[in-house]
Amino acid sequence: MINKTAVYVLWIREMKRFVRAKSRVVGALGMPLFFLAFLGMGFRRMAIPGIAEDMNYIQFLVPGIMGMSIIFSSTFAGMSVLWDREFGFLKEIMVAPVSRISVVLGRIAGGVTTAMIQAAFILGISIIMGFKILSILSLLLAIIFILLIAVTFLGLGLIIASKMRDMQGFGIVINFIIFPLFFLSGALYPIENFPTAVRYISYIDPLTYGVDGLRASLLQVSSFSIVFNFLILGAFSLVMVLLGAYFFEKSESV
Amino acid sequence: MNAIKVENLTKKFNGFVAVDHISFSVATGELFGLLGPNGAGKTTTINMLSTLLKPTSGFGEVNGFDISKNKNDVRRSIGVVFQEPALDTKLTGRENLEFHAMMYGINKETRRERIKKVLELVDLSDRARTLVEKYSGGMKRRLEIARGLIHRPKVLFLDEPTLGLDAQTKRHIWDYIKMLNKEHKVTIILTTHYMEEADFLCDKIAIMDYGKFVALDTPEKLKDILGGDVVSLEIKGNSDILMSQLKKWDWIKTLNKHDDVLSMTMEKGERRIPELIRAAQENEVDVTCVHLRKPSLEDVFLHFTGRTIREQGSSQIDRNREMIKWRTWRRR
């Protein structure tokens, strides 16, 4: 059922495209880095309720911005099915004798790797800016959360792609799905500050648990326990990826 | 043995019937052509046979495998060259071929050897390391044909293989297609709306219009249906007596007079011309010009559909297509 060579070759293809599209990589890193730099500098002296007084706002912000970079890059990677359709390459993939689940896995492998690399970049730059990593263990835990966030939103990207015909609605997806999910997640401020109604919406945003999990791993400060974050996000990622695969299988390739 | 067998194959898109109960079979080793104007349903037929589209109803078999039930077996045994390019332009030519070979589970050694061979076949060996985005249209087409051959398919589908190519490249690709069919014994199904292409390449031709087959036969037999060559005589003088004499000759199959031109169809027109001129002179009619034309598939298409194939342009069919796109978009 799962064809390992096919998964591998689809992953390799994503990697080659990633390495060759330098401007795209730089472009994708630009926004999170500017968010990090300017919000970090701008709110540096402010006391934000819900953040411990001895914690620098930038410390609080870094896991949020990592979450931002992952949600963007993973959703786009899932939606890249649409680019392949537009450029005709999807037909080449679909007419090959490999199961659809292998195709989905290949795409997920590629998307997760890309998200990892981008998150690593953000973390690297944050460290240069003064962010401190507590231990190897906290880094390993963070990697698990990065992976789960990436898988969740790759699934979302696949679902969105199956509902669209081309890239025309791309702006709508960014402005009305990805940005709200990002703001609701508490990446920039503690969600405890939201009015109750909005806070409840936050609770159904998978990124909330992703960002909180990253904070729990990297800062040992969080709203929920790390295990709770892991379980909820794990469940989200499983459901999203299965739905994504299901919709991908259903959609017609021509 | 039949490489392809199709019975009552039908595809509807939101009520619009793109392919309408077609039935045919293609013998192994045959070069089969689907000829028809844009929007006739040729590509939809190919897409169903290559498992990309699900038929609405009907039955299809490729290499003995059911196109609805044994998709993977069908996929393994066919090669497809699509109408629009289906290459990853951010990969090199060789990388595109490698991607394909690996998707078809070909091991490393065989892969290297076959890629080398197909690159030579399409004359792209020295450009294999170039990114496909730098390729010309003809090179992309050749690369795609090469890719379609790596896994040695028994049946190769070519959807408009020479669309938009210059005359020289077109000729080049025709030669490849012929060679593949004759020397490598690949069964080939191609679609085209170029008459001369179908005429030059195909052993058998199905003429398709509005989702249906209006004729299916060898190019020669299709042309025979028209009754042979068309001879036109441009004349001066009163032709009434001549006409009545010509009508008596049963080797003249059709006879029309339009202004000063008499046109008629007959077998072996070139042998009959002297006789026609003699008859004209005997009846005191001057022949100022003689024209002999061998029938083309263009005439055949006209005969069966009442239209020339190029008349279509942005006709009803294109409008229908637009409607479908729009509806599909709305539905989503």
Image (spheres, helix red, strand yellow):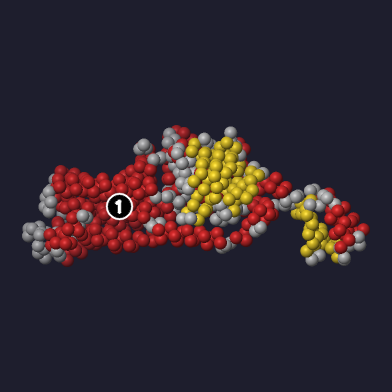
The answer to whether one can see residue A227 in this image is: yes
In percent of width and height, residue A8 lies at: 36, 40
- The outermost residue toward the left is A53
Q: State the residue in front, A161 or B166.
A: A161
Q: Residue at x 86, y 63 (%)?
A: B239
Q: State the residue in front, B96 or B59.
A: B59
The answer to which image quadrant residue A41 occupies is: bottom left
The answer to which image quadrant residue B177 occupies is: top right
The answer to whether one can see residue A21 in this image is: no
In percent of width and height, residue B270 lies at: 81, 50
Q: Residue at x 11, y 65 (%)?
A: A46
Chain under disc 1: A
In the image: residue A122, left or right of residue A48:
right
In percent of width and height, residue A55 lies at: 10, 57
Q: Residue at x 43, y 55 (%)?
A: A86
Q: Residue at x 24, y 61 (%)?
A: A180
Count up the numbered dots: 1
Q: State the residue in front, A141 or B227.
A: B227
The answer to which image quadrant residue B299 occupies is: bottom right
In the image: residue B35, left or right of residue A2:
right
Question: Circle 1 sits on which residue?
Answer: A156
Q: State the residue in front, A146 or A240.
A: A240
In percent of width and height, residue A152 lies at: 26, 49
Task: Reply above or below: B299 against A9.
Answer: below
